[in-house]
Image (cartoon, helix red, strand yellow):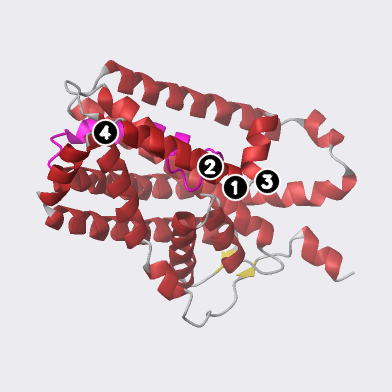
Amino acid sequence: MQLLRRLARSIWLRLLVSAALLAFVISRINLGDARERLSGGHWGYFVAAVVVLFASFIVGALRWHIYLTAAGVDLPTAGAVRAYLIGMFANNFMPTQLGGDAARAWIVSRPGSRLRSATTVVVDRATALLCLMAVGWLAIAANPEPVPGQIVAALGALTAAFVLGTLVLFALSRSARLRRKLPDRFLPYAAEIRQALAACLRPAILSRTLAIGLAFQGLVGLAAWFVGRSISIDAPFSVLAASLAPVLLVAAAPVSIGGFGVREGAYVLLLGYASISSTDATLFSLLSAAAFAIASLPGAFALLFRRGAAPTAAGADPGSRAGTT
């Protein structure tokens, strides 16, 4: 745990981990095969992957806007899209993959809505992961034969952990004993977060966002398939879709720079069970990262535009109330 804390705090240690993992993965690939794949690439597929990914960002932003509205953060749709695109850009170009989430929460918040905005980002992230796992299971159900048991097991373990974690958090949120142990100064903040969570998780809101989330993550899976086709990787959609959630979760661990090295190693391991070579899996991972980075570039241009009207909230958060007394 001490090592993980040091890695999370130190950019230099995380850079070293990324470099070491990438060097290890690259040492196991055939550079001649890699050059052949790239020289004979079908780059129209890669362009399609970038376009589909950008479309998924727009869908994701519209989905997040539903949570913001439910939590009482009054923000125009265009403002939510702008903040979401900036967040995606930051996720791809900052050392930590959580930096973009913090950025978009900060952009849309003002005194009176900061806790609510941050809560919507957490809910958005958690339910997006749920939708990605669901897309993986739906893909397996549609075409189970080519999906190796190891990939099914990885997705199953992640799903079980997600369900268990959700149940534990639900039990803790309902625990009166835990609330009594909180210092009095934290009780207003906890109440504000609970109110935002209850608003976002209402059945009417959750059914809409989960339906949109399936479309959102379906586009992400389609983009992954396009990336594979761009370098002639003949992997069925079900194999790639089932691998996405376990790999992306492992890559989000705060032990490397932007998941580099960890993501490539995870793809090499999982896709290897589907008879995809280390060379092809590594190229697929790096090109997927490149497609995400290019698709997120509009977020950089969004930073150049004048910020719109400030969001407001239906009520003030505890910090803003404290500041006015």
Distance Cα–Cα, label 1 vs label 2: 6 Å
* Amino acid type of the residue tagged 3 in the rendering: Arg
The answer to whether residue 146 is left or right of residue 118 is left
Q: Residues within 10 Å of mark 2 (few under 14, many from 20)?
A: some
x and y percentages locating residue 106 in the rendered image: 61, 64
Image quadrant holding the N terminus, namely top right
Distance Cα–Cα, label 3 vs label 1: 37 Å
- Which quadrant of the structure image shows residue 217? top left
Tag 1 residue: 12
Distance Cα–Cα, label 1 vs label 4: 26 Å
Q: Which of marks 3 and 2 is nearer the N terminus?
A: 2
x and y percentages locating residue 212 in the rendered image: 35, 50
Q: Which of marks 1 and 4 is nearer the N terminus?
A: 1
Nearer the camera: disc 3 or disc 2: 2
The answer to whether residue 35 is left or right of residue 312 is left
* Membership of 246 in magenta stretch: yes
Q: Mark 3 and 4 residues: CB-CB less than 8 Å, in contact?
A: no
Mark sitting on residue 25: none
Q: Mark 3 and 1 residues: CB-CB less than 8 Å, in contact?
A: no
Q: How crowded is mark 4: few (under 14 residues within 10 Å), some or many (20 or more)?
A: some
x and y percentages locating residue 225 in the rendered image: 20, 43
Q: Which of marks 3 and 1 is nearer the N terminus?
A: 1
Distance Cα–Cα, label 2 vs label 4: 20 Å
Q: Which of marks 3 and 4 is nearer the N terminus?
A: 4
Distance Cα–Cα, label 3 vs label 2: 40 Å
Q: Which stretch appears magenta?
A: 232-261
Tag 4 residue: 29
* Amino acid type of the residue tagged 1 in the rendering: Trp
Tag 3 residue: 194
Tag 2 residue: 16
Image quadrant holding the C terminus, namely bottom right
* Amino acid type of the residue tagged 2 in the rendering: Leu
